[in-house]
Image: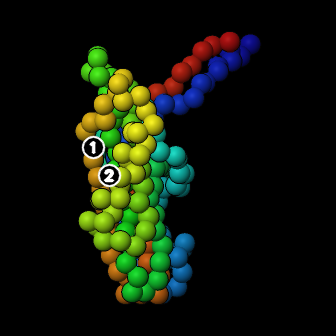
Amino acid sequence: MMKKVVVGNRIPYEFFTVCGVGESDISTHAGSFHLALADAGIECYNIVNYSSILPRVATEVVKPGKYVHGSVLETIMARVDGVKGQRLTAGIEYGWLVNSNSGKRYGGLVVEYMEHGTEQEAKMTLDVMLNELYDVTDKKKFTLMDRRTIVKSFVPEKKYGTALVALGFVSYILNVKLL
C-alpha cells in the first residue's frame, strides 16, 4: 500500500536579487522582456510572480550559477515596459518587521516601482510605499529594519523596452505530514 503525504503551503526560504534591461525593434514579450530577463541572467526560467510578502526565514543568497533550462522561478518582480525615448524605471525595496521586545524577525514587506521616473524618484517613492505598508502594522509591536533598495532605469533606443528588478526564490521549506 502506498503512503500518502500531505504537503502544506511552501515557505520561501532562499532568494536572490537581479535586475536587467532589454530593448527590441520586434516586440515586447518575446523581445525586450526576454532580453531584460537575459540581462538579469534568468532568461531560461519559467517565471511565476508572487505578491509582496517575505516570510521571516527568507534569506538572501547569491544567484545560482547554473539551473535547469525551463525550471520554474517564482519571483517578486517589478517590470515596466515602454517605447523608444521613454524612461523605464523598475525598483524593489524590502524591509523586515522585527519584534520590538524580542528582537526576532516576524516577516518582510516588499514594494515594487514600475513607472517612468528617475532612479532617485523611484527610491523616494519606494520609501513612501514601504512606509505606507508599515503604517498599517502594529508599530508598538514591530519595528521596520534592514531596508534594501534595488533600482534599474534606462531609456530605450529601439522601438520597445523593458526594465525589471526581481527577487527570485530558489528553495522552500515544506510542511509535510504522512497519512
Q: Dot 1, how many residues are within 10 Å of its Cα: few (below 14), some (14-19), or many (20+)?
A: some
**Secondary structure beneath label 2:** helix
The quadrant in which the C terminus is found is: top right
Q: Is residue 119 toward the left or the right of residue 133 in the image? A: left
Q: Which residue is drawn at 32% across and 52% down?
A: 127
Q: Is residue 67 toward the left or the right of residue 51 in the image? A: left
In the rendered image, which quarter is residue 13 located in?
A: top left
Residue type at the position of mark 1: Arg
Q: Which residue is drawn at 27% across and 47% down?
A: 148
| Residue 175 x, y percent position in the rendering | 54, 21
Query: How does the figure colour the protein chain or chains?
Result: rainbow
Q: Is residue 161 toward the left or the right of residue 5 in the image? A: left
Rounded to the nearest angstrom, the CA distance separating label 2 from label 1 is: 9 Å
| Residue 111 x, y percent position in the rendering | 41, 50
Q: Which residue is drawn at 42% across and 55% down?
A: 112
Residue 174 vs residue 51, the one in the foreground: 51
N-terminal label among 2 and 1 = 2
CB atoms of marks 2 and 1 within 8 Å: yes
Residue of label 1: 147
* Mark seen at residue 174: none
Residue 31 vs residue 84, the one in the foreground: 84
The quadrant in which the N terminus is found is: top right
Residue of label 2: 127
| Residue 86 x, y percent position in the rendering | 41, 82
Q: Is residue 113 toward the left or the right of residue 63 in the image? A: right
Query: How many numbered circles does the render carry?
Result: 2
**Secondary structure beneath label 1:** strand
> Is residue 113 visible in this depiction of the protein?
yes
